Image: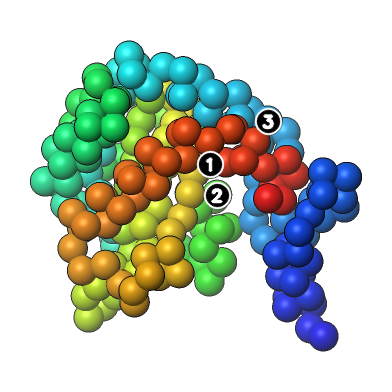
Amino acid sequence: MKLRPLLLTLLVLPASQGCKPMLYPVARAFGSPSEGELQLRRAAFDRLKAARATAKVLVYPAFRPATPNREAYPATAGLAVELLQGYGWAHCTATQTPPALPATPLMRNQLRYVQTRARSYSEWAKTTRPEADFLVILEVLVRPEGGIVGVHCYVLEASGQVAYARQFNSHQFGVPSIDLPANAVGFVLRELSWDVQRPADQVHPPYGVG
């Protein structure tokens, strides 16, 4: 058996709490954050859960991170604010310009790409210090012929600490693609609203094995 299929098989096997440390190198090989970083993310996620109804949240428009000019969909920021407010995030504000971060080369490993990108957003936030408690950043991956095949959602504290970073693709969509950015935003924020009701150690499982 080749190494990659073997690693994938190990990752999808049910993992008891005791054997999770054994699978930790496998998770890391696939791009999962270190356990030290995951501990920080669990704490930040718990702070997000506790404060989302009162925290000042800055929401960026969905955009295509792989295009040189970071093609954005400005109307999605207002839509995202409305949706988040409907989920109880009362103090959201839209901004029309995505984070000024250079494009990151897309990788065949979507998990590795998202975690690399999350670290880049963290460094960007540490430098810019946006005036908010939390930042919501949305990315979409679009086929050349149209159709959205990937959606990424990042929630960071303004200090730069990542609280949430998750990727979605057609396996979660249930169809080959999403046709409009607005639909992608609706999908990903619904998933976020469900995730913030889960325990932090389920969203960020110990050793990256869940």
Q: Nearer the viewer, residue 64 or 181?
A: 181
How far apart marks 3 and 2 lie (CA) works out to 15 Å
Which residue is depicted at the point 20% across and 69% down? 179
Residue type (three-letter) at the residue carrying disc 1: Arg
Q: Residues at badges 3 and 2 in contact (C-beta under 8 Å)?
A: no
Judged from the image, the secondary structure of the residue bearing numbered disc 1 is helix
Image colouring: rainbow
Badge 3: how crowded within 10 Å, few (<14), some, or many (20+)? some
Lower position in the chain sequence, tag 3 or tag 1 = 3
> Which corner quadrant of the image does residue 46 belong to?
top right
Q: Which residue is mark 2?
A: 115
Determine whether label 1 and label 2 are within 8 Å by CB. yes
Q: Amino acid at mark 2?
A: Gln
Q: Residue 173: percent from the left, percent from the top? A: 37, 65
164 horizontally vs 35: left or right = left
User: For residue 119, which numbered disc appears in the image?
Assistant: 1
Residue 38 location, quadrant = top right
In the picture, measured across the screen, residue 111 lies left or right of residue 205, that is: left
Q: Closer to the observer: label 1 or label 2? A: 2
Q: Nearer the viewer, mark 3 or mark 2?
A: 3
The alpha-carbon separation of the residues under discs 1 and 2 comes to 6 Å
Task: Residue 39: give its label.
Answer: 3
Residue 204 is tagged as none
Nearest to N terminus: mark 3 or mark 2: 3
Q: Residues within 10 Å of mark 2 (few under 14, many from 20)?
A: some
Q: Position of residue 23 (x, y in %)?
A: 82, 55
